[in-house]
Amino acid sequence: MTDAPTVGESRCGLVALVGRPNVGKSTLLNRLVGQKISIVTPRPQTTRHTVNGVLSVAGAQVVFIDTPGLHEGGKQAINRYMNRAAAGALADADIIVVVVEARKLTEEDEAVFARVATAEAPVGLVINKVDRVREKVQLLPFIDALRQRGEFAFILPVSAETGEGCELLEQELIARMPVGEQLYPEDQVTNRSMRFIASELVREKLMTRLRDEIPYGITVEIERYDEGDSRTDIGAIIWVDRDSHKGIVIGKGGTMLRDVGSAARQELIRMLDRPVTLKLWVKVREGWADDENALHRFGYE
């Protein structure tokens, strides 16, 4: 570990959080910045965009880049987009943090190790979900096996869910930040707008409520976002890629759409600390996930 920032010295750098889908990168990001800025569901490939989370402390700023999970097998344009987004974060990072799940390695993890092996930035390794390991001594053989995967600047066990080990990870990263001016104001925690976060929250609520085959064919477009004097008015379109999915998203008598809208609206109220109205519509655009023009329109850039 390098030295902590000295008095009067400013440090700032980019930390790319990478790993296969569903290892907890977004949960870790939210934990480290102390606020929910990236959506979280039990489903893989929840994160589709890069999201910057900003941690500002005395003399230093760490800008985390939450990336879509690096994955294999997806052949649609959206899969290629997500892998490109993750690869782009690797190229920009001052430090790369590979996140794996405690005592569980897959072929996709191995592909991530192979991808970062050629990166110019130093690579740290975070073993997440250690709260699920009752006897921590059981992690030792797993850590020994991970050391064979590459040369890591550090290996740290953490639990993004409980916060275990996260303070030590924060200190490790702050000490490794290069000297430089801060990229964001101290009170800013993300590069993403509330308009973007609103669309993601609607998609989060959909992904947690719908059947397995549907969430990946859904995207959300904010059509209206008006900050009034006393409340925020939001209108969003939920796009599905099959006509048969429209009725499922709406639900019998509109129940699914009402439940999703209510859950998203309540979370937005807590975030914005003001009244919010949220109106949702469901429309069909067949094959949008494999259509470059549609992806561009829906913000996949």
Image (cartoon, helix red, strand yellow):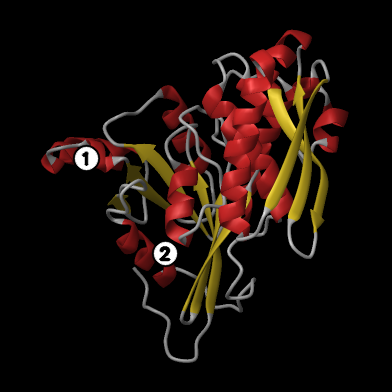
Give the SS element for disc 1: helix
Name the residue type under label 2.
Answer: Leu
Name the residue type under label 1.
Answer: Asp
Q: Residue furthest bottom?
A: 8
Residue shown at the point (64%, 71%) measured from the top left: 184
- x, y (%) of residue 151? 36, 48
In the displayed structure, 176 sits above or below 74; it is: below
Left or right: 20 as drawn, with respect to 295: left
Which residue does the numbered mark 1 point to in the structure image?
144
Give the SS element for disc 2: helix
Which residue does the numbered mark 2 point to in the structure image?
173
In space, the residues marked 2 and 1 are separated at their CA atoms by 22 Å
Q: Nearer the viewer, residue 46 or 67?
A: 46
Left or right: 211 as drawn, with respect to 286: left
Residue shown at the point (42%, 87%) measured from the top left: 6
Residue 209 visible, this angle:
yes
Residue shown at the point (43%, 69%) measured from the top left: 174
In the displayed structure, 74 sits above or below 17; it is: above
- x, y (%) of residue 169? 35, 59
User: Label for residue 104?
Assistant: none
> Mark 2 Cα within 10 Å, few/some/many (few <14, many 20+)?
many
Q: Nearer the viewer, residue 34 or 65?
A: 34
> Mark 1 Cα within 10 Å, few/some/many (few <14, many 20+)?
few
Mark 2 and mark 1 lie on one chain; the one further toward the N terminus is 1
- x, y (%) of residue 132? 24, 36
- The N terminus appears in which quarter of the rendering? bottom left
